[in-house]
Structure formats: C-alpha cells, structure tokens
Image (cartoon, rainbow, N blue to C red):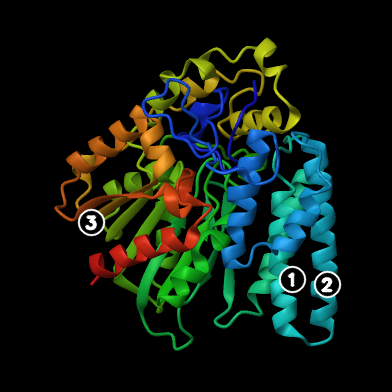
Amino acid sequence: MKQRIASWLTPVLVIALALPSLVAEKVKEEAADFDMHAAHVRYHFQDNDMDFTFGSVVLGSATNGGVEIGEAFATAAKIKDGDAASWQAEWLNMAKMAEARGEKSLAGGHKVSARQQLMRASNYYRIGLLAMLPDDPRLPEAGKKSRELMRKAGTLMNPPLEYFEVPFEGTVLPGYFRAAKSDGKPCKTLLMLGGGETFAEDLIFYIMPQATERGYNFITVDLPGQGLMPLQGKFFRADMWKAVMAVVDQNINRPQIDKTRLAVYGISGGGGFAPQTAQHDNRLKAVVVNSCVVDAHPLFASMTPVTTATAATVATWNSFHANTVKGVAWRWNVPMNNIPGLVEANKGFSFSPEKINVPLLSIVGYGEYHGGAEVRRQQKVCLDGVANVNKKLIVTPRGEGAANHCIMENRSLMAQEVFDWLDVALK
C-alpha cells in the first residue's frame, strides 16, 4: 500500500502517516482513509509521498523564486521513485550547481543573477534534507549551507533580508527580518510560523515576496523542533508560545514595525502555535491559520494507523516515507522506533479559542477540509469559540489548483486571500 506524506509535517499532517492515498483529482467526503497529504493531480512520481512533496513543496516554491521549473524536472528525472538516498543525492547535486553559478555571478559583480541563483541553491540544499535521518552527517552540513546561502542572497536584496538570532534558554532561535520599504518608516508586519518539519528558509519561499510587495514587513524564525534546533536539544513542546513571544520581544521595537499592526500567520502545526501565542500576547493584532489546530492530541489519538505503526508495519514503507516519519518523531523527542508515541507527545498542544480577542482567519485547502471530519470539526470549534466578531473561514477551491495541505501548490491564490483579509483587519 502506497503512503503519502508531506515534507512539512505538523501535528495535523501526521494523522495520515499510514493511510491509503486518495485517488488523484477526487476527494472522499468523510473517508475513513482520509489522507491530508493527498495531491489532487499527478505531478511526476508514482510514489504518492514523493509526488506530493515534489508538486507542493518543490514546484510550489517556483512562485517565489525557490525553484526553476527546468532544474526541478531535470533533477526529478534522475530520482528513483520512493528512494530517499536518490532524492537527497540529486537535489544536493543540483544545489551545488546553482551555488557555483551564483558565486560566479557574484564574483563578476552581477548581483541580480547572483541573488537568484543563491536563493535557489539555498532552497535546493533544503530540499535535499528531506527524508534525511538525524544521524546523517549531511543534515547539519546541508542545513548550514542552506542558511549561509540565504544570508548571502539576503544582502543582495533591497531592502536587505536581515538574519537575526533570538537568545532562548541557553541557545538561539535563528530567524529573518525584511522591511517592506527602505525608508525606515513603520509598516504593517507579518510574523510567519511554520510547522513540524519547517525550516525558516521554507517560509521565505512560502510567502515573503507576497508580503513585502504588499507593504508588510516580514519576520520568520525556527522555533524549538524546527530547522536544526533538535540537534541542540530543542524539541517541540506544548508551550510553543514562549518561544514565539521571545521572537516578538526581540523585534517589536524595530522602527520599521507599526506596533498596532502586527499579525501572525501559522501554517500546519503553526495553525496551533500562532493562536496559542495570541492567547498570551496582546501585541499580536490579527491571526491567520492554515488550518486551525485547536488541539493536536485528538488528531493523533483518533488515527489508528498512527497508534498501530508497529515495527513490522514501518518495515513495509519505502525509505522516503519511513525516513520522513522517523524524522518527525525525532523532532517531538519521540524514539524513532516508537511512532505511536507521537500521540502522547502531542498532549497539551492546544489553545482556547474563547481567549482569542483579535480578528482571526482560518484558510484551508478544499481537499484537506472536505477530506476529514476532524479537520472540519476543529475549524468549527475555532471559529465558534473566537471572541472577536471579525472571524472567517475560507476554503480554497480544488478547481483552481488550491486543494492541498497549506495550499502550497497555489501560493498566489493563498496569499491573495490572506492579505486581502489582513489589509482590512489591520486598518
């Protein structure tokens, strides 16, 4: 039985670890075998897991300069379906080629060419990390290389993309800030939070250009559990809001930030982290979630494929799927041979909707929303409970290629809905 799983795993995403895939271009209402990572078209690979990742994570980033279509398909053509080692080798090879081109342009003073190549190289190193186990020495090396190249590319932007570090419990949370304008005047600001396997660089390609071109400053960061933070002993935890508040503390006094118009947007697991922080921090003036995770624990506990993921079952998975799931367990500080332990590890990953007193938007792709009753239930609990009257649910259409988890395959449509709503909410 083929498996499907996204690379940006979250408490919401993991519910489909071992479920049968949905038929392409078809959503099964109330299906017991709901797969949140269903891609509603076939992109390239026969393996469902790898194909979703290629279509949503890889190709989806093209909108924001994360990938060149020709390079993506040239790389994909060399990859063995479902094989983690093949995926990693080919993407890391493409990363080196893009890096070499970028460095050549930079040495020649061709800043635009250098910036574009170095940004793609950063993303290709990041993509090469997918389905890579934590004991692989390439993990920290490629992760650091991705960050190094993004920082270098950031200096070639106008305004520049600034790298920062937030002191937090004996280590630092790495992040990025980019002002919307060069004049230093206060502007609206978007704080972007990712989910269960997100790197901060992912979120630059997810939405940063759409934010800055609309006049929003952009902030993103690696929280505990994300990026390379688990290598420093920082795993996902129920009180994620403490780390997010530390990020706000460090950035709120920037002269470019209008303190009355600071919004937070959380995708995947961030759909819980963002409103959880708003519950504790009144400096956040609007919340967007994609989608809302009121309580991660029942999403795990209700899924028998998670609770029954025995060693024998895991042994039947291909390496791309198995490595990805084991990596998720690692990020929650759960032994990689104990996938069912993710259920208990997610106790407390929740927030109280009635304590959210600011405008809230929940946006969710058609396939994710209509494919699972628990997803719909949590959106209803969230929207029914939020105290502020300015609250809205948007389900993006399958017919416009906006059905997948986090709407990663249509970031322009996603951003249109998010920022058109935020523009009004932050007036």
Amino acid at the residue labelled 2: Arg
Q: Nearer the viewer, residue 327 or 43?
A: 43
SS class, disc 3:
loop
Is residue 30 at all visible to an observer of this figure?
yes
Disc 2/disc 1 C-alpha distance (Å): 6 Å
- Residues tagged 3 and 2 counted as in contact (Cβ below 8 A): no
Residue 101: numbered disc: 2
The residue indicated by pointer 1 is 117
- Residues tagged 2 and 1 counted as in contact (Cβ below 8 A): yes
The residue indicated by pointer 3 is 359
Residue 376, image quadrant: top left
Q: Nearer the viewer, residue 212 or 16?
A: 16
Q: Tally the numbered discs.
A: 3
Q: Nearer the viewer, residue 386 or 399?
A: 399
Q: Residues within 10 Å of mark 3 (few under 14, many from 20)?
A: many
Disc 3/disc 2 C-alpha distance (Å): 45 Å
Determine whether 406 is above or below 318 in the image: below
Q: Residue at x 84, y 82 (%)?
A: 107
